[in-house]
Amino acid sequence: MINAYIPHGGSYQEPDTIIIHSMGEFINDGTQTQHAVAFLNEYKLSAHALIAPDGEIFHCRAPNEIAWHARGYNKGSIGIEFLVQGEHTYQTFIESIKSPYLTDKQLASGVALCKQWINEYNIKEILRHSDISPGRKVDPGNGFPWEYFLTLLGE
């Protein structure tokens, strides 16, 4: 577990939803390549946790703090980003999430973290970013084993 606090977000919240996202592990925005944590920080965004392909978890905000991860749904939700291995532009990222991309370690870490937060908070719903922003967001993509993930969570 790596503490990688990102200051961008709001104050106290009582989360009842977990929103699953994905993003590139390293992001090339055309001018530079940055690790996902640095990218979020530079663009004044945030998530509660990022899960790397090796299963390492980057904790960026406390679950009871608002993170800026899902426009219109930030308050009351916990955002978890599954990082797609390697360097990506937006176009290569969109292509990469069409096929399976999670590692076994990443999946195990994500399931364990979700179970922990489900038990600690009054989590009623687990959604994909694409569920709350259809037509605008496509992550975590068809390459994310959504039904299997929910099964592992006992949902």
Image (tube, grey):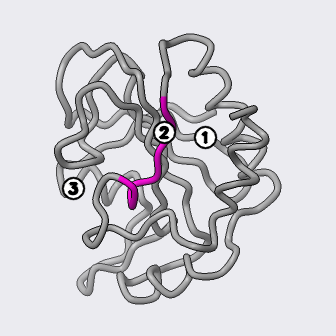
Q: Position of residue 149 (x, y in %)?
A: 71, 49
The residue positioned 53% from the left and 40% from the top of the image is 58
* Image quadrant assignment for residue 78: top left
Q: Nearer the viewer, mark 3 or mark 1?
A: 1
Q: Residue lying furthest right in this view? A: 104
Q: Is residue 128 magenta?
A: yes
Mark earlier in primary sequence (2, 1): 2
Mark earlier in primary sequence (3, 2): 3
The residue positioned 57% from the left and 21% from the top of the image is 117
Going by the numbered disc 1, the residue's amino acid type is Ile
According to the image, label 3 marks what residue? 42
Q: Position of residue 126 (x, y in %)?
A: 51, 38
Q: Quadrant of the N terminus?
A: top right
Q: CA distance from mark 3 to mark 2?
A: 16 Å
Residues tagged 2 and 1 counted as in contact (Cβ below 8 A) = yes
* Image quadrant assignment for residue 8: top left
Foreground: 110 or 142?
142
Q: Which residues are magenta?
A: 125-131
Q: CA distance from mark 3 to mark 1?
A: 20 Å
Numbered circle sitting on residue 57: 1
Structural crowding at the residue carrying mark 1, measured as other residues with C-alpha within 10 Å and reported as few (<14), some (14–19) or many (≥20): many
Q: Is residue 23 left or right of residue 30?
A: right
Above or below, 28 against 74 in this view is below
Numbered circle sitting on residue 49: 2
Going by the numbered disc 2, the residue's amino acid type is Ala
Q: Position of residue 97 (x, y in %)?
A: 55, 76
Q: Tell me the SS state at disc 1.
A: strand
Above or below, 108 against 31 in this view is above
Q: Quadrant of the C terminus?
A: top right
Q: Is residue 152 left or right of residue 119?
A: right
Q: Nearer the viewer, mark 3 or mark 2?
A: 2
